[in-house]
Image (cartoon, coloured by chain):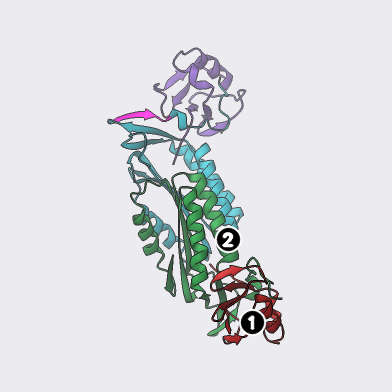
Chain colours: A red, B purple, C green, D cyan
Amino acid sequence: MVKVEFLGPISQEVLELEAKTLADVATQLQNIETIAPWLEKCAVAVNDQMVSDLSIVLKSGDKISILPPVCGG
Amino acid sequence: MVKVEFLGPISQEVLELEAKTLADVATQLQNIETIAPWLEKCAVAVNDQMVSDLSIVLKSGDKISILPPVCGG
Amino acid sequence: MELYRGSLDVEAIFSKWLNEEKNSNYGAYIPFVGTIRAEDEIEALSFDIYEPILEQWFQGWVKRAEELGAKVKMAHAIGDVPVHTSSYISAVFSPKRRVALELIDEFVEDFKANAPIWKYDVKDGKRIYAEDRSTPMSGSGLLA
Amino acid sequence: MELYRGSLDVEAIFSKWLNEEKNSNYGAYIPFVGTIRAEDEIEALSFDIYEPILEQWFQGWVKRAEELGAKVKMAHAIGDVPVHTSSYISAVFSPKRRVALELIDEFVEDFKANAPIWKYDVKDGKRIYAEDRSTPMSGSGLLA
């Protein structure tokens, strides 16, 4: 099981998913109606490291963070 | 008579000169051995206005300032 | 990096950083002070921050600045920040002015684009995500 | 524009300017603080200023900034300024950050090139013109 947390304005509690790679996470999130529209504009971190590759292999307990568009300052 | 003042590091007291134009001032300053080497790198103001034209007509009492290379800050 | 609940004490932070580098022999100190403007009838802006990734982002700039012989600092508010008060201060110290002037520009712009901070308008006590002013971080869309 | 004899009180000037514009609804405040570096065994730098032309130069920038909806401020020391103390502070206030970041850069660079200020190294109590670091003002050479 991996944990998926949604940051900032995305109103979604932490999800626990079965996933071997980040691609598996993508497929599952695309099927959640309230989450899917966010995915186009969200960046992703695995265990607090920004990532850019869907083939990343996940292990149980990994934390995936979904980061929507930012505006600091 | 016009007054010529030398600013910053140029060690020269105020000069009083007869001059009808800024060109007349130039000619006279070029003949002063201690001043001539400065002229190439100095800017000029007449009555505290920066100028860029030798044909400027001067009147008695005008103040000409000679401004050597600057370095504020 | 310093995070504070609510508005920043601008004078205190400016002085603290000045004194921290008093004897570091830097020739240029350029702070950028961001203040909440009164506009669109907002009472305040409000901020969420994801600290682990902000800290990493900031450490990347610390390293980058170090390579240039410079130093960066940053403070940001968490939660509500009323109009006419400050939510964000960043600063560069450097021996020479060119490095400092270029670095503060790049640092502030990259902050705007990639620091994991979310902004909300506060109107009638309600928090509304400032979506129109927000920028997708680099790498966005990976899961779409 | 503010001229002071000796080192600038950096914290006081920063706070004074901050408070002057407290209610002006500017979103960005960028000061540039110049500090005398300890190098070449100098004790201090020393400055001569020709105020009438400095004031005109500064007013040109006030107007320029106004056209951009911004404001500039400046303070400089006259006479001796010991190492690790400040001789120069300038600042830009503006509604938006891009204008402020670009303006502070241009303002500081033009200041370096065209403000009528002369700099001297102070070594063993003697004042030596910093000729190698000085720049002829625009229009130089007219009388040569």
Real-space Cα separation, disc 2 to disc 1, in angstroms: 33 Å
Q: Does the magenta portion include D33?
A: no
- Taking depth in this image into account, of C119 and B35 the one nearest to the observer is C119
Depth order, front residue of D107/B14: D107
The numbered mark 1 sits on a residue in which chain? A
User: Which chain does the numbered disc 2 sit on?
Assistant: C
CB contact under 8 Å: marks 2 and 1: no
Please say if B28 is above or below D122.
Answer: above
Residue B1 appears in the picture as rendered = no
Task: State the residue at coordinates (58%, 59%).
Answer: C109
Give the magenta-colored segment's residue range. D126-130
Q: Label 1 crowding class (10 Å Cα cut-off): few <14, some 14-19, many 20+?
A: many
Q: Nearer the viewer, mark 2 or mark 1?
A: 1
Is residue A37 toward the left or the right of residue D141 in the image?
A: right
**In this figure, which residue is indicated by the disc labeled 1?**
A19
Quarter of the picture holding the N terminus of chain A: bottom right
Give x and y (percent) for residue B8.
Answer: 42, 29
Please determine whether, in this image, residue D135 is positioned above or below residue D103. Answer: above
Is A49 or D79 nearer to us in this picture? Answer: A49
Whether residue B51 is visible, yes or no, is: yes
- Residue D127 inside the magenta-drawn segment: yes
**Tag 2: residue type?**
Asp
Most common secondary structure along the magenta stretch: strand
Count the marks: how many? 2
Which amino acid does the dot numbered 1 rest on? Answer: Ala
Q: Which mark is residue C110?
A: 2
